[in-house]
Image (cartoon, helix red, strand yellow):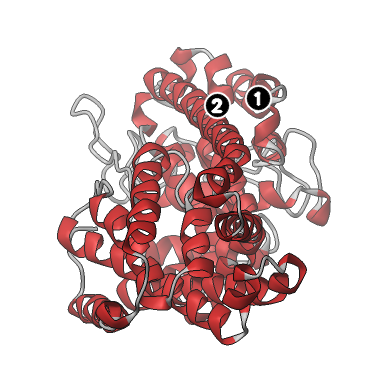
Amino acid sequence: MEAVPARARVYVAGVALAALICLAPLPAAGAPWWAVALLAALHTGGERITARRSPGACHPVLLAGAFLLPPPAAALVALPGALLARVDQRPVLLRRIWRAAEPVLAVWAAARVFGLLGGREAVASADFPYALLPAAVAVLVFCAVLALLDGSVLLIAERVPARRAWRGLFTRSLAPLGVHGLAGLMMAVLWRSRYGPVVSLLVLLPMCVSWWAFAQYHRERAAHQATIRALVQAVEIKDGYTRGHGERVGQASMMIARELGMDDERVEVLRFAGILHDVGKLGVPTRLLRKDGPLTPEERRIIELHPEYGHEMVRGISFLGEARAAVLHHHERMDGSGYPYGLVGDRIPESARVVAVADAFDAMTSTRSYRRARPVEAAVAELERCAGAQFDPRMVEALVRALGRHGWHPVVTADEVPPSRPPAPPGTGTGPEAARGATPAAGPGQPQGTSPGTTPGRQEAHR
């Protein structure tokens, strides 16, 4: 996001000013400068090596500084690594200032609390059990400050609702920071013991193993993303008229999932579900996907096999989780007239009900070879009209709330229509069935001309 609102710039400036105030008493802190320099160099080097694959991996060094040094000196440990860290997004200077000010404040607060609770004296006397309590409180403060600052910048810069801005920030980081805090405390105790600073650095060896494991996780995650990209690209090459449709459905599915209060891991799975929901089209003959004019009943039956084809393709990909059920059931309907199995109501997996609404919404709001895009308002009205019969009303309401709060700004757009296949002229119908001379009301597996007005989402099944 290159265009940062003025209110966000003011907020970052305020946080940076607070960080400078925390560092101001540094000359009078009486800290051993060699220790500050050693910890700062260790943190900077570690961040340069691990930051891109494992952000925050060097927090044990920062917390060790909070347990060993006065608050201003401990805060200084975080500064060089943050200022020298790579910043890929613009505006670079503003982001660099933010990334530097945030850990400075968090470390200063943790060191301040640790000192007030007598933790530094316990570390100096190697009273390890007694030091656990102030260390635990300091870690909680460190975690809370980071969560508070991160949530505040989401609220101010991106206008994320207050009920969502801080949700999960503290709880998700508490466990890893607790481990980092324990490692930092062990470093501090060994540092002050007769073994000295060199031996204390051995505590970082098991942390290095954990960093390596985390890097392996990121490599695996990158492989997952590459797998999904390859599948989506294959579908889009085969059915070029829906280029970007999967990504947009994934984005709308995320909006619904977040509005329903799902956790981040499940939101990500539903994004995968939206992206891959039409992967089964790889098993459908290209001539049917690109056919002009009405489909024959036999051709419709072939195309309606694509959810089962898709499920067979992804059933062995374990990381997709419930996204596999969404691929299979996203054309089911609440009244039981959908396909492939005619499931009714809550028997349809929740993930499939989410994707069904997202799929229908994008199908109506993007231009296809057989009709022009509808306005968002018209698509929403159609979804609301069909809620209960075709769509889960709860999913429709969630999408409407999300659109009202954030609008619809799809990341991927593919709305140009090849000139050789212009959209149907106004007045000749809006759905693919209308473009093919069929009644738009035809339900899945029903003769055309029945169940009037209940098929906006299902219309896209035939392409």
Q: Is residue 88 above or below residue 114?
A: above
Q: Secondary structure at mark 1?
A: helix
Q: Amino acid at mark 2?
A: Val
Mark 1 neighbour class, 10 Å CA radius: few under 14, some 14 to 19, many 20 or more: many
Q: Nearer the viewer, residue 12 or 300?
A: 12
The N terminus - image quarter: bottom left
Locate residue 83, reporting x and y percent. Answer: 24, 56
Q: Nearer the viewer, residue 244 or 54?
A: 54
Which residue is depicted at the point 79% across and 35% down?
A: 341
Which residue is depicted at the point 32% across and 67% down?
A: 76
Locate residue 172, reporting x and y percent. Answer: 62, 61
- 413 with respect to 149 (left or right): left
Q: Nearer the viewer, residue 192 or 396?
A: 192
Which residue is depicted at the point 53% across and 45% down?
A: 201
Locate residue 403, reporting x and y percent. Answer: 43, 68
Mark 2 neighbour class, 10 Å CA radius: few under 14, some 14 to 19, many 20 or more: many
**Number of the front mark, 2 or 1:** 1
Residue matched to label 1:
314
Single out the residue that lies furthest toward the front: 194
Report the disc number at residue 279. 2
Give the image quarter of residue 306.
Answer: top right
Q: Nearer the viewer, residue 436 or 206?
A: 206
| Residue 175 seen anywhere in this rendered image of the structure | yes
Single out the residue that lies furthest toward the bottom: 116
Q: Are marks 2 and 1 in contact (CB under 8 Å)?
A: yes
- 202 with respect to 341 (left or right): left
Q: Earlier in the sequence, mark 2 or mark 1?
A: 2
Q: Is residue 260 above or below residue 233?
A: below
Give the CA distance from mark 2 to mark 1: 9 Å
Which residue is depicted at the point 24% across and 61% down?
A: 95
Q: Amino acid at mark 1?
A: Val
Q: Secondary structure at mark 2?
A: helix
